[in-house]
Image (spheres, helix red, strand yellow):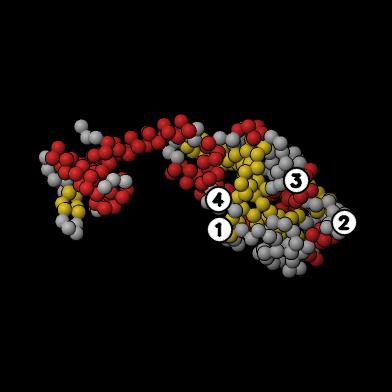
Amino acid sequence: MLERHEIEAFLTLAEELHFRRTSERLGLAQGRVSQTIKRLERRIGAPLFERTSRHVALTAIGAQLRDDLLPGYRQIRHAVARATEAGRGIGGTLRVGYSGPMVAEILLEAAERFRARHPGGDVRIQEVQLCDPFGPLRGGQVDLQVTERPLAEPDLTAGPLLFSAPRTLMVPDGHPLARRASVSLEDLADAPLLTISGEVPRYWLDHHYPRHTPSGRPVLRGATAMYWPELLTLVAAGAGVSPACAAVERYNGRPGITWVPFEDAPPVEFGFLWPTTAGSARIRAFVDLCPALDRAPGPDGVGAPSPGTSGAPGRRQRPG
C-alpha cells in the first residue's frame, strides 16, 4: 500500500522530471524527495526513473505506474475539494444577474475561473430587466447581481465596482444633435427624453434621466419603455433621445440611431449588489475572482483601464 506522500512525490516528479522543481512544488528538501523515490522503487522492485546528472526520465514501469495512479489521484483530490467547498459554503450553484451584455461577458469569464478554482461550485447567469432592477434579487431568482449605480436600498448591500464607462446620448439620425461631435447635459432640454418605466426607484431614474439640466432648465419627459429593445425602437423612430453607456453601442448599434458622446456627464458605474442578509462565502469567492474589477470595456468591448471620468470620446454611428 502506497502512502499519500509517496504518491504525491512520484506523480510530481513524473510531471516535472526534475528533482529541484519537484522539491520546490512539494515544499520538501531535495534529498527527502530522492529518498522517497528510492524507497518506492525498492517496494516496487524496479527502477521508476532513469537518472543522470543532466537527465531524469520515466522508465516503462514508471510510465505505467503514473498512468495507473493519476486518474484515481485526481478523483480523490476532486472529492476532497468538493467536500472542503461544501464545508466552507462555496459549493452549489450561484445565480448571478446582469443588466447589460458587456457585463455578461465579464461574468462568463469569472464563472469559468470560479468553476476551475472551486470544483464543487457552479455559476448561472441571467439577464435582469431595467424595469425591475431589484425584483429578481429580492424574490430569490438571483443571489448576486451587477447593475448600474447608484444604489440606496436598505435591504441590499453595494459590493465592489466592476467597471465604469463613458456615457453617450442615443439620438435619432435626423435630429440636429446627431450632427454634433459631442453633447452636454444642457442639451437634454432640447429634445424629449425617453426613459425606463416600471419598478424603478425615483433616485435611480433621476440619476440616469435627469429632470433638469445643470443650469436648472427643465428636461421634457417623452415616452417610456419597459425594456431596452423598446427604447432603441423609440429612439430610431424619432420619438426622442436617451442616455446610455457607451459600451452598449457595440451590441446595440442599429440603423436610425447616432451615438453622440457626452462631454460633461459622469460615467456609468456598474457594481455588485446582494441581499444584506444573504452575504455568503460563495458570493465573496465569486466577486474576488471577477477579472475586470474597476475596469471598463474598450471600443471593442474588451476590458481596458477605467477612465474614471466622463469626457473620453465614444464611438459614433454615422447616419445612413
Residue behind mark 1: 302
- Going by the numbered disc 1, the residue's amino acid type is Val
- Going by the numbered disc 4, the residue's amino acid type is Ile
Residue located 24% across and 35% down the image = 3
Residue 65 appears in which quarter of the rendering?
A: top left
- In this orientation, does residue 246 appear? no
Where 15 sits versus 174, above or below?
above
Sequence-first disc among 1 and 2: 2
Looking at the picture, how far across and down is residue 236, in whole percent? 74, 57
Residue 197 appears in which quarter of the rendering?
A: top right
- Going by the numbered disc 2, the residue's amino acid type is Gly
Q: Which mark is residue 106?
A: 4
Q: Residue furthest right?
A: 217
Crowdedness near tag 3: few (<14), some (14–19) or many (≥20) residues, C-alpha within 10 Å: some
**Mark 3–mark 4 distance (CA, rounded to whole Å):** 23 Å
**Mark 3–mark 2 distance (CA, rounded to whole Å):** 19 Å
Residue behind mark 3: 204
Sequence-first disc among 4 and 2: 4
- Going by the numbered disc 3, the residue's amino acid type is Trp
Q: Which mark is residue 216?
A: 2
